[in-house]
Image (cartoon, grey):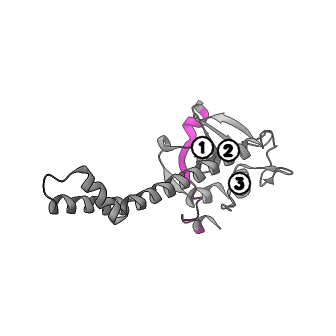
Amino acid sequence: MSRWLCILLLACATTAQAAPQAASPDDFDQFIADKGLLTRLEDVSHRVADKAHVVADHTSNLVLNAMGFLGVHYKRGGNSAETGFDCSGFVRAIYEQTVGLLLPRRADQQAAATQVIDKKELQPGDLVFFNTMRRNFSHVGIYVGDGKFIHAPRSGAQVRVEDMGVAYWARRFNGARRVATSAGEDTAKAKQ
């Protein structure tokens, strides 16, 4: 989109230099129409809006899918609703089922294969990591919005939503990551 915007600005600057000072708005409109610039900008604008819509749909579907597993029992090494999930198995299953992306198996590998973002930039569907075993990125969950995340917490517990502001999670927060999910983004790194 920025390429087309630059072209339009250059065209405008060229027109402003070449045209007399008293050029009418109609002359400018005619110039843009003659060059087909307006049509190109509209096309780019529609493509950007379409992509934003697809990303929003993926995010909504991801969070809704994750919520469908509330109450599934925790199982160390678990990868499915039938047998139970551990934290990284839960995240991996949700991303695979919802967007067809196979993330690495362990939480630390998931952190390494995803884009670092600031906590203030968190959006639903992003990953949140915690230090729960005296090592970085030992626990992972999916951010659902409003300072909350969904995860498979520990043995004897079930998949649930928790508040990141609770002292236990706030003290152990280790970082936020964004998963590249669109076709144009580099997902090869995540497929291990």
Q: Residues within 10 Å of mark 3 (few under 14, many from 20)?
A: some
Horizontal side of residue 184 vs 150, given as left or right: left
Q: Where residue 109 appears, x then y in whole percent?
A: 61, 60
Residue nearest the observer in this picture, 15 or 181: 15
Magenta-tinted stretch: 168-188
Residue nearest the observer in this picture, 159 or 66: 66
Residue reaching furthest to the right = 82
Q: Marks 2 and 3, Cα distance to the nearest angstrom?
A: 9 Å
Q: Where residue 24 appears, x then y in whole percent?
A: 21, 51
Q: Residues within 10 Å of mark 1 (few under 14, many from 20)?
A: some
Secondary structure at numbered mark 3: helix
- What residue type is disc 3 on? Thr
182 within the magenta span: yes
Secondary structure at numbered mark 2: helix
Q: Where residue 64 appears, x then y in whole percent?
A: 71, 43
- Look at 69% across and 51% down and name the residue there: 91
Q: Where residue 26 appears, x then y in whole percent?
A: 27, 52
- What residue type is disc 1 on? Pro
Residue 62 appears anywhere in the view: yes
Disc count in the image?
Answer: 3
User: According to the image, label 2 marks what residue?
Assistant: 63
Residue nearest the observer in this picture, 126 or 169: 126
Residue 152 appears anywhere in the view: no
Q: Marks 1 and 2, Cα distance to the nearest angstrom?
A: 7 Å
Q: Earlier in the sequence, mark 1 or mark 3?
A: 3
User: According to the image, label 1 marks what residue?
Assistant: 124
User: According to the image, label 3 marks what residue?
Assistant: 98
115 within the magenta span: no
